[in-house]
Image (tube, rainbow, N blue to C red):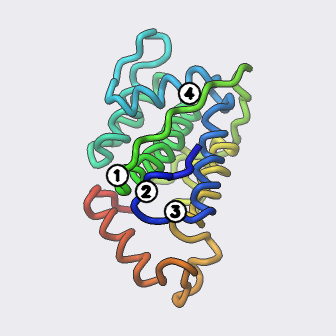
Amino acid sequence: MFDFAFSPVPVRDDLKLTYRTIWEHFARPGPTMDAKQRSALLAAARSGRSEPAVPAEGSALWHLGATLYADPAAVTESTVRDAADQAGDAAATETVGLVAMLSAVDGAHRALGVALEPLPAPAPGPATQNIASGLKRRRTHLPMPSGAIPSALDLVPEVAKVYRDSFGPQYMSESDMAFSDFERTPGLNRAQIELVSSRTSFINECFY
């Protein structure tokens, strides 16, 4: 899994480990969905399906996932609020986290011209119901603490942890961001990293 044998360039070991960690997370039950529901949602997002085979699974969640994966600029407040109204804030937040991580991993594969990794087999067990309390909307579409992007998924802590842990290998860790002269060895320096990330955000019309 994630050996990148056919990649035209070497892929760092920390990225491979991060992708495996994300896949292991996908395979487990989440805060609001069991692993089978997560797998179905992720497969639908990949294929562009916005309507579940079983309506009870929540069509608004699937629409949110499919839109976020294929056309993030098209996600509006109503896209998110419809999902939250239908399935709850925590389910909508979990969906955002899962699909954001899937999109990042798949995007790297497409950029390298290699086949997408098959989604993992879902593990048994019910949803964990591990949901934070006391959070509220702060001019945001979903409840979160005060702060920036790293806190956006804190309503569902186990998803938020995997999401935040992926920052370092894919971009920079929160501590690395404090240093303007940060340089990855091997890899890019801070200016180069910001140029790539800014260009990616601009192309995807992803602004914060």
Asked whether disc 1 touches disc 2, contact meaning CB atoms under 8 Å apart, the reply is: yes
**Residue picked out by circle 4:** 38
Q: Secondary structure at mark 4?
A: helix
At label 3, counting other C-alpha atoms closer than 10 Å, the crowd grade (few under 14, some 14-19, many 20 or more) is some
Q: Residue furthest bottom?
A: 181
Q: Secondary structure at mark 3?
A: loop
Q: Amino acid at mark 2?
A: Ser
Query: Viewed as shown, does residue 101 lie left or right of 67?
Result: right
Q: Amino acid at mark 3?
A: Val
> What separation in Å lies between label 2 and label 4 (alpha carbons)?
28 Å
Location of the N terminus (image quadrant)? top right
Q: Secondary structure at mark 1?
A: loop
> Could you say where residue 52 lies in the image, as x and y percent from the top left?
41, 16
> What separation in Å lies between label 3 and label 1 (alpha carbons)?
13 Å
Disc on res. 113: 1
Q: Earlier in the sequence, mark 2 or mark 4?
A: 2
Q: Residue at x 46, y 50 (%)?
A: 140
Asked whether disc 2 touches disc 3, contact meaning CB atoms under 8 Å apart, the reply is: yes
Location of the C terminus (image quadrant)? bottom left
> What separation in Å lies between label 2 and label 3 (alpha carbons)?
8 Å
Q: Residue furthest front?
A: 5
Disc on res. 11: 3
**Residue picked out by circle 2:** 7
